[in-house]
Every structure is written in C-alpha cells, then in structure tokens.
Image (spheres, helix red, strand yellow):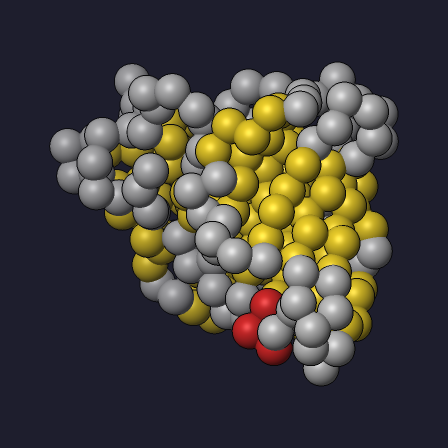
C-alpha cells in the first residue's frame, strides 16, 4: 500500500472562488479516489479516477490525473460555504486486496 | 438502503477497561474495513475483513486489538486494556468493489 499526500494542508477562500487541491503519490496505481469529510463525520466518496483516465467531472468537481507526475488535482468551482470540509485522496495500487490508503487531507474553509 | 452504521457514536473508557466498537455494513456488502483517525490527521488503515475471515490486519497493533466479522451480526473492533493513546475516532467502511462507504465513526475517549 502507499499513501497519497494532499497539498496544501489548509486552504481558505471566499464563496464563489475556485478551490484546487493536489495529491501526490509514490508508485503506480490502479485508481485514485477523492473523499470529503465534514467535521466530526465519516468520509463521503466524491469521485474515482482510473489510471487510464486523465480527467473526470462530477457537478462542480473536476479531477485530473497525471500518472507521469504521480499526481492528481481536485478542483471545486464556484465554491460555497457548504463546501467547507477536509478533502482526502486515497490510492489503490491493486495487486490483490483492495486497501486504499489516505493522506492527511486538505482542510478547506469557504467564507460566505 | 441504510448506510454503514456504527455504534456507539461516543465511548468513554477508563484506562485498563475494554472498548467494543460495532459496525454494520451496508446491505449486500461483504467487505469491512476499520480505520483510526487522530485529530488533524488522515485515516490509518487497521484491518480488512470479509465474513468470517481476516484478509489483512497489517495495520492492527500487535497487542490488545482484535477484530472480527462473524457470519451473522456486525463487525466488532475490540480494544482490551485501553490506554490514553487509544483515544481517537474509529471509522468503519464497507464496500463491494472499489468504492468504500463510511460510517459516522465512534469517538473513543480514554480517561
């Protein structure tokens, strides 16, 4: 297993602005997923991108994957105060049991 | 379809007591994962189980911690003789394939 590392650790923006978070990992992956965690709650799955995909959209979310750089980004467009949460990436290297490993997360604060 | 359920949501124990955390996966899910999360940190994998089998327990401390997922009933994470360092949020997740669905967590506080 391997760990994704999110960057920045914390991000503070105004409502309506875009938020970009990055995730880097170390070895080859089968897929990469982004999750969101509101304070005191469990993680909620946002989006999965496979190693043969470069970009994926879901509503106001846009995820990119660059396997040559071993990095992914999560873009939230037109942010809202309700987007305030911690965002985690999780990678799966495959090769048997599916055990995603999580980074420390990016803490996003969207000010109304 | 109810989501992943965990209970209790909060658990307070004194040092040396036992803590039992329960997780009921989503209906139809046969894979359960347990994670531990310390404040301001990500989730640390502990154990991966299928019904009646431990698939991977590489993240479990060698002593005092055990997990099971019986044929009937919830998955149980058991911590014996708790110490203050066990205080954390414990999350369980269930899945069928690649996507995990998380429960709300159990916050364990050891006094």
Give the quarter of the image for residue B88: bottom right
Q: Does residue B105 show up? A: no
Compare residues A37 and B9 and report the one nearer the observer.
Answer: B9
Where is B13 relative to A26, above or below? below
Q: x%, y% of residue A16?
A: 55, 58
Q: x%, y% of residue B16?
A: 69, 73
- Position of A24 compared to B74: left or right? left
Residue at 50% of width from left, 69% of height from top? B40
Compare residues B107 and A75 and report the one nearer the observer.
Answer: B107
Give the quarter of the image for residue B13: bottom right
Residue at 71% of width from left, 66% of height from top? B108
How many numbered marks appear?
A: 0
Residue at 54% of width from left, 34% of height from top? B48
Where is A66 relative to A7, above or below? above
Compare residues B103 and A7 and report the one nearer the observer.
Answer: B103
Where is A13 relative to A59, above or below? below
Work out which residue is located at the far bottom of the displayed protein and give it: B111
Q: Does residue A31 show up? A: yes
- Position of B107 compared to B43: left or right? right
- Quarter of the figure that contains the N terminus of chain B: top right
Where is B83 relative to A74, above or below? below
Residue at 55% of width from left, 73% of height from top? B85
Compare residues B90 and A20 and report the one nearer the observer.
Answer: B90
Q: x%, y% of residue B99?
A: 56, 28
- Quarter of the figure that contains the C terminus of chain B: bottom right
Work out which residue is located at the far left of the displayed protein and give it: A68
Q: x%, y% of residue B105?
A: 71, 53
């Amino acid at each position: 297993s391997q760990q994704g590392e999110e960057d920045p650790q914390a991000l503070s923006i105004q409502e309506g602005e875009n938020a970009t978070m990055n995730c880097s990992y170390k070895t080859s992956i089968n897929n990469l997923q982004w999750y969101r965690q509101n304070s005191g709650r469990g993680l909620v799955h946002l989006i999965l991108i496979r190693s043969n995909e470069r970009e994926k959209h879901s509503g106001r979310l846009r995820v990119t994957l660059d396997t040559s750089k071993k990095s992914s980004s999560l873009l939230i467009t037109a942010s809202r105060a309700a987007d305030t949460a911690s965002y985690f990436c999780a990678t799966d290297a495959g090769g048997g049991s599916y055990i995603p490993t999580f980074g420390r997360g990016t803490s996003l604060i969207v000010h109304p | 379809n109810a989501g992943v359920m965990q209970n209790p949501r909060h658990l307070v124990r004194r040092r040396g007591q036992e803590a039992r955390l329960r997780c009921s996966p989503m209906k139809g899910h046969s894979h359960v994962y347990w994670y531990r999360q310390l404040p301001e940190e990500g989730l640390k994998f502990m154990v991966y189980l299928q019904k009646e089998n431990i698939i991977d327990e590489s993240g479990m401390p060698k002593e005092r911690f055990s997990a099971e997922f019986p044929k009937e009933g919830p998955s149980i994470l058991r911590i014996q003789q708790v110490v203050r360092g066990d205080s954390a949020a414990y999350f369980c997740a269930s899945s069928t394939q690649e996507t995990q669905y998380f429960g709300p967590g159990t916050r364990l506080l050891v006094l």
